[in-house]
């Protein structure tokens, strides 16, 4: 059935709806904004449309310079030499038999470069978020303030979110690489929060452009307090959402090409927040035999 | 409504019609409230298709709250009522006025949007009965699609979006709809419309995620600060054996000079494991009282203080062997040569962060040093070592909820204190801390 177009938000992931286009007017205005699926980034309501050719924003200059060339050739050399060590740079036995893998551990300033923070400042809200290293340079400390006053642009209804998202791993010359987690079935986090509920989002590599904002989410409930909290979430619990809306057709997350993992906070409680992460790892839990936690059969039959 | 000529009525005898009316009016009010009206409805099924002459406005509209009909901004209705006390009863009254005002329910979409916006002001946003009452504002059976073409083409899109927005507000507040909601939605929009689909989604996902929080917080937190402190301390204690003790209840004292002093509450928690750790602590190393750290329970933020020490340097660590008589059911230590290889590795290859032991936590009404000193002296009954150990206070100037970034940064001192930490503290504080240290030591000696 025909549904009004919902704005796509590439950097925003929430379960409850954040934004929705208002009612379609009964007489559509002659210049109604229509974004094609293939069109790229989110355009803030009120900002003028940019009439550029697709190749114009790309920077073809030499400003990236010598450092860029050195970095990319070093990565290329590493890729060639890794082949001699084993698949994906690890010895074959380790690649086949590993039960645990630490994906991210925050042990120095260079580990923060793999993460991006964003908040609803991008859509005109007033939340703030910052990321720094914790004490002893051993943990990452995400803190900020949440403010759920929606921006006054006539369209946005809800606001107040902050996210921390990992960068897509890159090979030499900025080619996309993926995390291969097919031999694992549980996500293990060591966090210390302040009692707020977070949402974990895993974005995988997709084929069709309609699936660009697909994400697999699950809740991360922090206890608060001075003690560290070990959180183990099996991948079978992650449910599929698109633009923050949970979907009817669910399927388990495909782990062979994971792109990014992210943490979102949008619990409608205005005020400061903080989250410390010690490490993020994946492991294989032999005691967990569930394939998927939600029903896969068609639940809303067609009209 | 009764002026409409019904085909049904003409087919029946007058006596039967009267009997039907009487039975309809005397029927018990059931969840399907509009069945009463359905008896009197005409063949097309809704008052909108009434064949009778249109009723002049002034006969229907006698209530002065409704105002003139020209351009009714529906917020005004609520504003007019808002001069009285804003309660559920007044909200329902406004909705009733609108429902009774016009059979055709002109402007019901705008009215419902305005009502949804005003709900938090009237305090009824978590009340399911109010949402069902709002759903009754929609005229029934008008928007139900009657053939496949209407079903395909988003029949009455504006009303469907309004229904969706109502359900979305219910979803945002976490309210589970009930069977009355479903019946109303089916009557208004039909079974294949968007609102009913959204209702089905809510009924599928909400029960799945209702109990997914491993640390659940009740909807109504205790209002007494001592109870709230006890609840939050047992939550963060990470140990089932920990017991919260109330060191001081809030009270107001009048001193000799007639001044009123309010004493804040002090609730502390310490588990037997923490007592043991503190007993093993080296008295020459100081312990720190740090705080305030925030803890969020739904929408309220409470602050707690922590008594902890720096991690012992590796040369001072003493490995105590497990006492075999501590547990007679099974051995606490097993020397087994398990022949494990790479495929059986169960632990992550991450160095264990040693941040130092935490000895106790507390929550008080006022985070001043005098109050925290009282807490420490309260702890001293079970932990006599506190009298000999220097206690340093690392407090930030009072807990504040909504802060700017700079203040927020200074308020967060979670985590271990490296040896280079001292240079962050200004020298005056160091001097103050030394004074406090001497004062604590002298107090400790006096206690013994």
Image (tube, coloured by chain):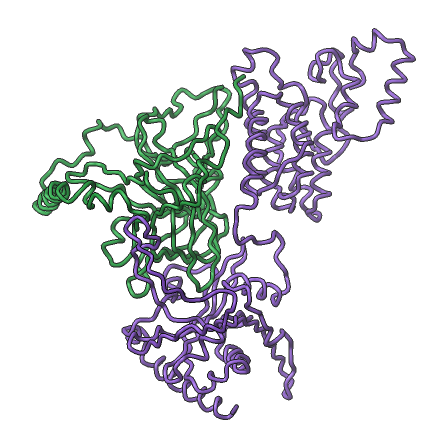
Chain colours: A green, B purple
Q: Position of residue B287 (x, y in %)?
A: 41, 78
Residue furthest toward the top? B11
Residue furthest toward the left? A66
B367 lies left or right of B263: left
Comparing A239 with A109, the one in front is A239
Residue B237 visible in rendering: no
- Residue shown at the point (51%, 69%) measured from the top left: B328
Q: Position of residue B116 (x, y in %)?
A: 60, 37
Residue A95 visible in rendering: yes
- Residue shown at the point (59%, 11%) measured from the top left: B147
Is A139 rendered above or below residue B253? Answer: above
Is B442 rendered above or below residue B129? Answer: below
B301 lies left or right of B43: left
Q: Position of residue B243 (x, y in %)?
A: 57, 69
Comparing B238 with B31, the one in front is B238
Q: Position of residue B170 (x, y in %)?
A: 59, 38
Comparing A119 with A165, the one in front is A165
Residue furthest toward the right? B15
- Residue shown at the point (76%, 23%) measured from the top left: B35
């Amino acid at each position: 059935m025909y549904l009004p177009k919902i704005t796509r938000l590439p950097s925003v992931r929430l379960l409850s709806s954040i934004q929705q286009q208002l009612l379609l007017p009964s007489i559509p205005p002659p210049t109604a904004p229509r974004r094609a699926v293939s069109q790229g980034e989110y355009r803030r309501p009120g900002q003028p449309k940019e009439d550029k050719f697709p190749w114009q924003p790309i920077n073809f200059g030499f400003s990236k310079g010598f450092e860029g060339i050195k970095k990319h050739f070093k990565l290329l050399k590493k890729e060639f030499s890794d082949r001699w060590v084993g698949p994906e740079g690890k010895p074959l036995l380790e690649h086949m038999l590993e039960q645990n893998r630490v994906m991210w551990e925050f042990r120095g300033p260079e580990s923060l470069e793999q993460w991006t923070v964003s908040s609803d400042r991008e859509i005109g809200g007033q939340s703030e978020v910052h990321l720094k290293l914790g004490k002893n340079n051993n943990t990452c400390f995400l803190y900020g303030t949440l403010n759920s006053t929606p921006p006054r642009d006539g369209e946005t209804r809800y606001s107040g979110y902050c996210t921390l998202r990992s960068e897509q791993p890159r090979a030499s010359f900025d080619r996309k690489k993926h995390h291969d987690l097919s031999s694992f079935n549980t996500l293990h986090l060591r966090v210390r929060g302040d009692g707020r509920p977070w949402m974990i989002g895993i974005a995988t590599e997709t084929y069709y452009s309609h699936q660009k904002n697909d994400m697999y989410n699950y809740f991360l409930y922090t206890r608060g307090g001075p003690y560290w909290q070990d959180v183990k979430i099996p991948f079978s619990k992650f449910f599929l959402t698109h633009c923050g809306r949970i979907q009817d057709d669910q399927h388990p997350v495909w782990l062979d090409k994971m792109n990014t993992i992210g943490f979102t906070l949008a619990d409608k409680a205005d005020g400061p927040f903080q989250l410390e992460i010690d490490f993020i790892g994946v492991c294989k839990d032999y005691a967990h035999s569930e394939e998927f936690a939600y029903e896969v059969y068609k639940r809303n039959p067609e009209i | 409504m009764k002026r409409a000529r019904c085909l049904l009525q003409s087919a029946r005898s007058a006596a039967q019609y009267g009997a039907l009316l009487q039975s309809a009016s005397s029927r018990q009010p059931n969840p399907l409230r509009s069945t009463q009206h359905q008896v009197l409805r005409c063949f097309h099924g809704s008052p909108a298709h009434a064949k009778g002459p249109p009723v002049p406005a002034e006969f229907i509209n006698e209530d002065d709250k409704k105002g003139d009909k020209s351009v009714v901004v529906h917020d005004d209705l609520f504003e007019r009522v808002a001069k009285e006390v804003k309660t559920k009863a007044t909200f329902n009254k406004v909705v009733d006025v609108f429902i009774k005002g016009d059979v055709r329910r002109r402007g019901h979409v705008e009215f419902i949007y305005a009502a949804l916006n005003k709900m938090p002001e009237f305090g009824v946003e978590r009340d399911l009965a109010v949402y069902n009452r709002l759903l009754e504002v929609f005229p029934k059976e008008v928007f139900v699609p009657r053939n496949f073409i209407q079903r395909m083409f988003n029949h009455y899109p504006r009303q469907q979006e309004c229904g969706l927005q109502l359900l979305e507000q219910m979803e945002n507040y976490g309210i589970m709809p009930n069977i009355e909601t479903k019946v109303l939605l089916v009557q208004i929009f039909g079974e294949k419309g968007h609102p009913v689909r959204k209702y089905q989604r809510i009924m599928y996902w909400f029960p799945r995620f209702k109990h997914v929080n491993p640390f659940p917080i009740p909807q109504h937190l205790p209002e007494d600060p001592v109870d709230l402190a006890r609840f939050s301390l047992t939550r963060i204690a990470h140990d089932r054996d920990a017991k919260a003790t109330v060191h001081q209840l809030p009270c107001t004292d009048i001193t000799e000079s007639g001044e009123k002093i309010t004493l804040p509450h002090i609730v502390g928690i310490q588990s037997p494991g923490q007592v043991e750790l503190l007993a093993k602590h080296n008295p020459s190393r100081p312990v720190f009282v740090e705080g305030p750290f925030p803890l969020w329970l739904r929408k309220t933020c409470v602050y707690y203080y922590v008594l902890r020490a720096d991690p012992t340097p590796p040369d001072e660590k003493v490995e105590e062997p497990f006492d075999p008589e501590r547990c007679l059911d099974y051995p606490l230590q097993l020397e087994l040569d398990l022949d494990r290889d790479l495929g059986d590795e169960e632990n992550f290859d991450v160095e264990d962060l040693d941040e130092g032991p935490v000895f106790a936590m507390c929550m008080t009404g006022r985070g001043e040093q005098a109050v925290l000193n009282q807490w420490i002296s309260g702890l001293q009954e079970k932990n006599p070592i506190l009298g000999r150990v220097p206690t340093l206070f690392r407090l930030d100037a009072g807990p504040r909820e909504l802060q700017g970034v700079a203040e927020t940064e200074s308020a967060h001192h979670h985590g271990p204190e490296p040896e280079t930490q001292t240079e962050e503290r200004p020298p005056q504080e160091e001097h103050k801390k030394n004074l406090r240290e001497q004062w604590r030591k002298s107090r400790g000696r006096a206690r013994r």
